[in-house]
Amino acid sequence: MSSRLEEDLSCPICQDIFKDPVVVSCSHSFCKDCLKTWWRDKQTLECPICKRRSSRSDPRCNLALRNLCEAFLLERDQKGSARDSTTHNKHRFRPITEAAKDHKEELQKSLNPLKEKLWLFKEVKGNCDQTAEHIKIQARDTETQIKEQFKKLHQFLQEEEEARIAALRKEEKQKKLILTKDLTSVTRGRKQELPENPERIYTYPSVLGSEGFDSGSHSWDVEVGNSPIWALGVVAESGLSELDKMSRLFRIAFCDGEYTVDSYTHRSTVLSMKKKKKKLQRIRVHLDWDGGELSFCDPDTDTHIHTFTYKFTERLFPYFNTVTTHSLKILPLPF
């Protein structure tokens, strides 16, 4: 009877004694929470047993069933281990403290290997953490060293680049038929291989003016300064096609302390400069193409030096020659 009563007082869903039993419209009863859980995943509110649809979403409490369940549970608790239900007639019963002690000892035996493994795990984890920290410090130190080394390398490369560029600029400067940007000054540089140019003077370190004259009068002042060797004058356009560019040249030159004049129509002549105690610093070149005269004078003392007389028939270009690194510079004429 007790077993049958327990079955009658058990919820069909959880198979346990009813807790807060409710009754649906088909008269079946269930635990309140069990029914709510059952209905939660259902599209319709139907009875878990007969599948009949419930008319209410909040079934009424089955007060009588609840009282009966409470009385049953109270009676079962009072009987305790002394009950002689056929369901438990072969079961062994022991005091809770005694059974708990046995289970505790078994759990302790099971826990000891786990505790040992946990201790080993913590030890290994500690070593791993120390290794990770050491690796982190090593990486940071190595990164710092790499940055410092590359910083020094960058600085070295920058200095090396600047030094090489400076050396290249110096070499470039030394190698040029060197002209200033405004094309008013020329300095001799080192000999170099250059592309073919019909207007280039190969035999002598000389340059020509960019503008030629075939009429009128023209003058230009040239600062020779303390240059020990120089030559100034004009060259005829037909002479530009000849290799040495000397066959149609009219010039005044200074070399070994002597002033000379020469042209393809006049032999070289040493000029007498008896009253000149100091070297000429400037030379004024005056070309009267129509009058057939090319003259040189000292603009500082307004002293005539020499004049070529010749009937010019072709374009003439200003001529400049400097053998040393001293520069020759064209000066603006005074007004």
Image: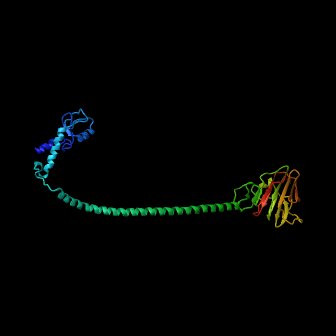
Given residues 63 and 305, the one toward you in this image is 63
**How many numbered marks have been drawn onto this rendered protein structure?**
0
Q: Quadrant of the N terminus?
A: top left
Given residues 79 and 112, the one toward you in this image is 79
**Residue 76 location (% of width, % of height):** 14, 47
Residue 242 can be seen in this image: no
**Residue 235 location (% of width, % of height):** 81, 55
Residue 121 can be seen in this image: yes
Given residues 44 and 219, the one toward you in this image is 44
Residue at the bottom extreme, as displayed? 256
Residue at (11, 45) in percent of width and height: 2
How is the rendered protein coloured? rainbow
- As displayed, is residue 255 above or below residue 90? below
Residue at (28, 62) in percent of width and height: 115
Residue at (36, 63) in percent of width and height: 126
- As displayed, is residue 261 above or below residue 57? below
Query: Is 291 situated left or right of 102 in this image?
Result: right
**Residue 171 location (% of width, % of height):** 68, 62
Residue at (71, 59) in percent of width and height: 176
**Residue 3 location (% of width, % of height):** 12, 45
Residue at the top extreme, as displayed? 55
Q: State which quadrant residue 221 falls in.
A: bottom right
Given residues 35 and 254, the one toward you in this image is 35
